[in-house]
Image: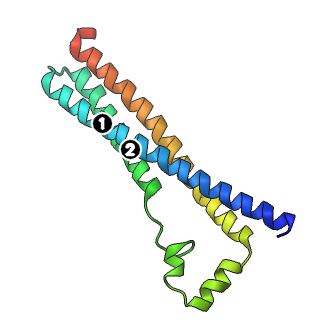
Amino acid sequence: MTTAEQNLAAAHAEVKTEITRTDTKTALLLAFVGALLAGAWTIARDLPLTWPALSAGSAGMALLVAAAGLLLRSVRPNLNGRHGFPLWATLTPEQITDAVTRDLAVDIAGLSRLTVAKFTCLRRAVDLTLSGGALLVLAVVFALGGMA
């Protein structure tokens, strides 16, 4: 294996690792957002909600739901057949051999674009989660008499 082939193989492995890391972070954040939504709903049922608390809380919940949507979009399976299993499932054994031996740089570029798209969704979801959480804290302050 030449140095160029080794570098391509290392880059390919690095991109796959980044996809795994991003998917892991996404799963953890999705669980956190789900827990936040459930906890906020439980607390909101027991508090007397004023209009400011209701407005801030509703906006916070909407941002958390939007964050969950972005996270789900990030981990949605790509079944259009460009990479990996979906493509291989449509090929003959000879075509699989050709696809595996083709230029690795093409696969690295495609997977890198996929990684950037996943990372962008994750980043936006983190921003929405932070904003939604801040609005929920504000709603609790309003409900407990901070704006009385």
Count residues near mark 2 (Cα–Cα under 10 Å), then give few for <14, some for 14-19, many for 20+: many
Q: Is residue 8 left or right of residue 147?
A: right
The mark nearer the N terminus, 1 or 2, is 2
* Depicted 124 relative to depicted 39: above or below: below
Disc 1, SS:
helix
* Depicted 36 relative to depicted 93: above or below: above
Q: Which quarter of the rendered picture does the N terminus lie within? A: bottom right
Residue at the extreme front: 1
Label 2 is placed on what type of residue?
Answer: Leu
Disc 2, SS:
helix
**Residue 9 visible from this viewpoint:** yes
Query: Residue at point 29% right, 15% down?
Result: 141
Nearer to us in this view, 126 or 104? 104
Q: Is residue 18 left or right of residue 79?
A: right
Q: Position of residue 107 (x, y in %)?
A: 67, 69
Q: Which residue is mark 2?
A: 30
Q: Position of residue 84 (x, y in %)?
A: 55, 72
Label 1 is placed on what type of residue?
Answer: Ala
**Residue 147 visible from this viewpoint:** no
Q: Is residue 46 left or right of residue 119?
A: left
The CA span between labels 1 and 2 is 9 Å
Query: Residue at point 36% right, 37% down?
Result: 32
Q: Quadrant of residue 100?
A: bottom right
* Depicted 59 relative to depicted 9: above or below: above
Q: Which residue is mark 1?
A: 35
Residue 108 badge = none
Q: Position of residue 105 (x, y in %)?
A: 74, 68
Query: Residue at point 49% right, 82% down?
Result: 89
Marks 1/2 in contact by CB < 8 Å: the verdict is no
